[in-house]
Structures are given as C-alpha cells and as structure tokens.
Image: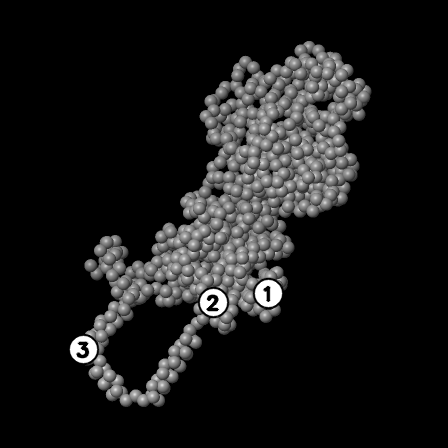
Amino acid sequence: MGVNSDAAAVYGHKLSTVVPGSVSGETVVHELADMDLVMKLHYVRTVYYFQQSETVDGLTIVDLKKPMFRWLTSYYPVTGRIRRTEAGRPLVKCNDCGVRIVEANCCRTLEEWLQVPHSARWRPLVPDKVLGPDLRFSPMVYVQFTKFQCGGMAIGYSWSHVLGDPVAGTNCINLWGQLLAGNPPPKSLLPHSARTPTARPARQPPVSATPLSVKQVEPAGDLWLIADACKMATDSITITESRLKHLQSEKLNSVPAFEMISALFWHCLASVRRGGREPRVVTICRHKPRAKKCAELSNEQMISTVSTSHASPADLDLAELALLVSKQKVDETTLVEESIDGDGGKPDFVVYGANLTFVDMEGVDLSGLDIKGEKPVQVDSVIDGVGDEGAVLVFPQGADAGGGSKGPAAVLILPEDQILKLREVLKREFDMA
Amino acid sequence: MTGAPLPLFSSSVKLKYVKRGYQHLVDNFVTFLSIPVMVAVGLELARRGPQEIVGLWRALELDVIHILCSVFVIVFVATVYLMSRPRPVYLVDYACYKPPSNCRVPFSAFMEHTRLINSDEKSVQFQMRILERSGLGEETCLPPANHYIPPRPTMEASRAEAQLVIFSAIDDLIRKTGLKPKDIDILVVNCSLFSPTPSLSAMIINKYKLRSNIRSFNLSGMGCSAGLISIDLARDLLQVHPGSNALVISTEIITPNYYAGNQRSMLLPNCLFRMGAAAILLSNRRRDARRAKYRLVHVVRTHKGADDRAYRCVYEEEDAEGHTGISLSKDLMAIAGEALKSNITTIGPLVLPMSEQLLFFFSLVARKLINPKRKPYIPDFKQAFEHFCIHAGGRAVIDELQKNLELSAEHVEASRMTLHRFGNTSSSSLWYELNYIESKGRMRRGDRVWQIGFGSGFKCNSAVWKCLRTVKTPVDGPWSDCIHRYPVHIPEVVKL
C-alpha cells in the first residue's frame, strides 16, 4: 500500500469553525514572548486513536463540538489570529476567529489502519496546515475527527508551536476531553490572562556568542514553513523496560532514562552518518514543570547543547556519551531568547533539527485525553517543520497509552533512509527491534 | 415677513409654550367647549328652580307607551352599537428565541469564511466594508449549517433550524402563559424564504398535537413585514370567531438562503440576516383581558407593489452564474421613504391628536394653495406614541426613519440595539425590540407602541399597541443575560 493510497483512504472532508462561547473583548491581544517567536516555524501534530465502542459510536459531531465553546472561552487566545505590530513583531489578536474543525471518513478499519507504517499513518488524519501565506486568516489550531469503517475514531490535533510548547498543547486538548465527559471546568483552572504589551528594550543581537542550538534561516515572511526541508519520515521505537534497565545497569545506573536514550540514539545515528555530517553537537530540549491545571500558553523550554570535542560520538562508549549528556549540558535558553530582536521579532530560527535534537516529552500528558472515560488505544505525536538534522522525541511512558506500560518510546523524525539504517544499527549492536 | 419660514420661529422658546397651549386647547377642545355649556345649563336649572322643571316635564305629556318605546329605541341603538364594535384583540404574551452561544458568528470568523468560500477578491472586500458599517455586534448567530466552509444548506438542515427556533419559542411561550396546546384555535405562521411540504404550520401541529379543527395558515414569500401581516390576519380571524385565541409565529429560516455568488447587490442579506423567531399569543376572550400585556389598536398595511420600481426593489433571482440570491436595488431607501409616507398618511388620522392633525392640514393647504416650495410639516408622532419599534433591517433603514420621523436617539435605541445583538432577524425583529423596551423597564400601563415593518413588495406595515399593565423587570427573554450591557455605543465603522 503506497503512501498515496493511504492518504486517499481518508475522504469526505468537511470544514467548519468553532468559536469561543463568549466574546473575548474588543481589543484583546496575546503578546508573543521571545521564546514563542523562536519556535514559530514548528508545529505539533498528534493523533489519538479510539476503538469502536458504544460511547464512541454514540457521539455525533454536534456532541463533539458542544463542549468546545466552553473550552475555547478558557483558551481564547488559540482562537485568535496573527497580526504584526508596526515594527513587524508578530502577536496574536484575540478576535474569536476560532479553531478549524475537519470531519472525514476512512474506508478502512482502525485495526487495518494501525498496521500502516508510522510515517504514513498519522499524516492523513491531522491537517498538515501551517501559518500562512495569509497570516491574518490562518487558524493556529486544527482538530480533525476521522471515522473508521468499523466505528472507531481518530482525533487529529494540530497545534502551532508559537502558542506554546507540547505540554501546553496537550493540556489544552485534555481540557476539551474533560468538558466532553461532562465535568465542569476545574476550579483551579486559571483563566488565561492575556499578556499586556510591555515595553521591550530594543536589543542588538550579542556579538560575542551565537547560540549553537538554533539555526537562523531565511526570513520566512508570512509563510511560517521551513524552506526547502528534505522530506522527513517518522517512526516510533519502544524501548522495553527490561532493555532500558539492561542498558542502564550495564553502564551506569545513575543516568536517568531520557539521557540514556538520547545517548543511545546519538551513538547509533553517528554511526549511520559516519563519513557524512556527523552530529558532533546535539540540542537537548526539556520542558520546565508547570502547574498542570493552569491554562497558561507559553513556551517553557530549556534548550541546551552537548558537544563532543574531538571524538566522533560513534566511537565513544555509550556510558561516556550518557555521562556527557547528563552532566555537560550547556544551557542556551537565555542566549536563544536574546537573539530575537525586541521590536521586529526577527530573525527566524529553526530549533528542532538545527542540530540533532532530543526532546524530553516528560510532562506531555498524552493519555490525559479521553472520550467520556474511553482512553485512546494508540497515540501518534510528532513535530512538523523539523530541520535537516532531525529530532527524536522521547516519551517517558510509551505512546501506546492502553494495555500496560511497555516502557519509554522514541519518536524519530529523520530522513527515511536514515531511519532504516538506524533500525539496522539498533538491531545489530543493541539487539533492539 | 410673508416669506419667513416656520422653523425660524420655532427656535424661539416662547413659541414652544405657544405650541403647548395650542396643543392642549385643540386636543381637549370638546372638554373646553362643554364646560361653559354645562355651567350655563347648571345656572339655568338653578335659576328656574325644581318646580318649574317638574312643570316642564308634565307639559311633555308622556305616557307609558311613549316612555317604553323611547327606552326600547335607546336600548336597541345601544345594542347595535355595542355589537358592531370590533372585538378587542389582546396580546396575552410573546416569546422570542434566544440563539445559543454555540451559533455565534464573530466578525473575524465571518470574514475568514467569506474569504475561503468566495474566490472574488472584490466581493470579499465589499462584504468586509458592509460588515464594518453594518451596526451588528459580535454575538449575532447563524444556524449550524452556515458554520461550514462552504455552507451546507440541505433540506434536513433547514428543517432542523426551523424546528429549533420555532419549538424553542413556542415552549417558552407555553411556559410563560400556561397555554395548553389543545386550546389553540388559530395558528398563523410566517416564514418568507423556506416553505417545505408539509408546511411549517403542519410541523407545529404535528409536534404539539394541536386540535384537528384548528384554523391554520402558512404565509410565505411575504418578506420582512410579514410579521405584521400575520397579526392582521389573526386579528381578522378573531373578529369572526368569538372566544378564541390565536398563536402567531414569525420567523425567517437562514439555512437555505446563503448566496454563494459574487454579485454585489445580492451580498447584503448574507452579511445582515441572522437566526431568530418569535411566538405571539393573541386572544379575544374577556378573561384574558385581565392578564394581557397589550391591546391591538390599529393595523395599517400599505402596499406599493403597483409601482414597478417598488415591485422590483427587493427581487429574488439568479445571477449570471446561476446562483440564486435576493437583489436589493439602489433606490431601496427612497422607496422605503415613500412607502413610509403613504403609511403615515393613513395612520396619522387614526393616532395623532387633533392638534397635530390640524397643523398638518393647514400645512398641506398652505403648500397646495400658497407656496408649493414650503417644507412639508412632519407630524410629531412622539405625541401619539411613547415607544417605537422600527424593523431592524439595517443601519440605513433606522437612520432614514429617525430622520424622517424626527425621532430622538432614545426612541430608536431599541431598534439599534436589537440590530447589534441579534442582527436582522427579519419579521421577528419587532418582537426583540419590544422585549428590549420591556427589559429596560420602560413599558408602563397606558403606553402606546408603534411597530413599523418594511418588506419586499414593497410593503410598509404598521401596528399600534396599547400597554395594559406595567411590565416589571427583570423580564424573562432573550435580553435577560445581556440587558445590563446595553445600550452600547455603536461606532460608525468597526475596524476588523
């Protein structure tokens, strides 16, 4: 089954819009912080798969849309649209323009669909739109409901990174799930306080240090898409608990799982790319912990780099590499923020994929979305708009939310040939399927 | 001094008091006349003394037969008079549909949809300009089918909208009045643009299990003024059937009528028309007189269809690409003005106090005989009515009428605010406006209300109601959760 036929299996798209139930206000504006603008060329795409059941069958599109009006009243900035200040800096005008809803059908059953390779599986089920070319009228959030032949359903959720990091994005959709189940919005949920414009001093980019973790790209203008990116494929590899313990105990058990896994993939990808562009520097992205119930929209990442000075990572021992990752991170978060010009919001950066990037998805509550108590049987979550060096998203708990914890999962976003070679290396050297 | 125009004089304060005195004199002319007469008669009687009066009586030489015949004649004349008077028609209560917030259409969403559906940049810009100047707010509502890109106007969706708006309004009315569905004698439904088979009135009869001998009527195609036409029809039926009540439903179903083309004259309805419905309970039963809110005093209908220009000014047709839409001609305002003038000419004598009528008559005579260029005297309708409900057809209509009738901002506030909060809900807009006035606590016993509707044809219809009991706030209705925010200032142009 080719990619084309997979995409063609999803048909009958119907577009509509859902707006917040209450008027947000006359001239309400959500300011975009520097870190938001750094992340603006990336998009988080997530697909939740729900099995056929009475509950899922009984839900019509009207039932699915009904809690959205209350949901969007709490999260009204996500329904806004991008505008620019006179100096050119983007901000979000909270004009209640709404989120776009897509309804589609799939002529296959859920079971059949889950057999499709990862890369081709999630794309047809979530709108792969970006912001632009007309920024003023581009929705920042999309939700797609796809009904399978058997009665199962997939919910595709597209989130623009400029609004917030994946933690904020999943908290947002999880609230919808709670409202759908009929729960009142949690009292501790702070209504989003729109940031008021603050006087920002005009900053010159620091002459001395340019951050290694990000790459400046050609001005994206009004189309927030990475220009001429090579086509990225995706894959998901689950690392069983036993295998992880084996790796950790073999080497050093003081290294936490995320660093261990990052080191593992760094090592393997280095050997895959040997002779070509070896990843001497990698970027590590972690999310700052935030109060779970808070409706804050922000990019709370800590971006750091790790570099191997002379040796190729493929030659280094896994233990050494793991130690390097956990101990010798160079925090570049502030440096990255300061690279953004206060007035114009320029220049445009790529974060994920500028170097080989490892993203710690701890705190991203993928299992938090349920349909009236029904949990998804599978969740595919990727980041779109990743640069050429690729990225690995490490989920602490496997993305198969149902059926027992299998262990952490790594979602790879790499060129297709590299993924195949990587799998070979993993099998050969570490006996991982 | 001969050519001095009247307005110059009227700016002087002294003239205001003169005018007041004149009004009191003419309006209460009969009273002023009868007082001296009664005084004279009283004096004469007192002068003559009781014996003389008895003597006068004896001189008439009346006997029993004469007396009985006279009494009989008097009773007969009185009965004929009382029987031939029209039955009073009471408005017991009414209910307006409040659209839920999940049908809300903010400006930005409307514009985005328009851009996605419409390929022609010019017509998108045109619609944006209309919306900016329309006087609509951010809370007007469209039915669920219109939230799709492009809208999906299926028959099923249209019926669903009709059921939603009409049944909600009727349920509300039943709750307010305690009306029993089996008790309804007459049913009149008006919906201009959606006319399925079986009719909307049959849909209501089916849902509420109304009686099999109900007199039901379904008026379609009669435009935005059809609400008052339905009231007129119900009133006429209530004259023929004693001890009856009538349920009148006024609505406009938006789903089937989205215009998908690019012709400018047809784009206005897309921008202005919104969801709404009203259910009104009329009765001629004496026991309802105690609890009724209003009494219907007059209904005046004016039809300018005989004039070709008026007939074609609101015209449904297909454009060059085959899309059906309602085309509004450029002289719509002028025709509306003329229709209003005709209507005023008929209604004026019925409602205006004698003082205004005399002034108007003299001004007319002066224009005809002395100076044709003299400005026509516009009768002061504020003397005749406390409240005005002008069909919220659009900002231009309300502005035009405010100017023509010389109304203050407070008089047209109900119309403007209804346009802002609910948009142009066609025939039901008059009832939203009336509800606004009640919700503001301005409706007192004895107040007179003038409802003016305009519609395709070209028609101008008026209804005059008299309030029978002061309406206490808070009023249960579509304004209940937002009346505290109104009135709002509506800017000339809203920047999108």
Whether label 1 touches label 2, CB < 8 Å: no
The alpha-carbon separation of the residues under discs 1 and 2 comes to 22 Å
Q: Position of residue B471 (x, y in %)?
A: 43, 56
Q: Which residue is mark 1?
A: B210
| Amino acid type at mark 1 | Leu
Name the quadrant containing residue B34.
bottom left
Chain under callout 1: B
Q: Earlier in the sequence, mark 1 or mark 3?
A: 3
Give the SS element for disc 3.
helix
Left or right side of A155 for A81: left
If the image is split into quadrants, where does the N terminus of chain B sit? Answer: bottom left
Q: Which residue is mark 3?
A: B47
**In percent of the image, x 69 and y 35: which residue is there?**
A47
Residue mark closest to the camera, 1 vs 2: 2
Tell me the amino acid under the disc marked 3. Arg
Which subunit holds the residue at mark 3? B
Q: Residue at x 21, y 83 (%)?
A: B52
- Whether residue A256 is visible here, answered yes or no, is yes
Residue assigned mark 2: B287
Q: Position of residue B426 (x, y in %)?
A: 50, 56
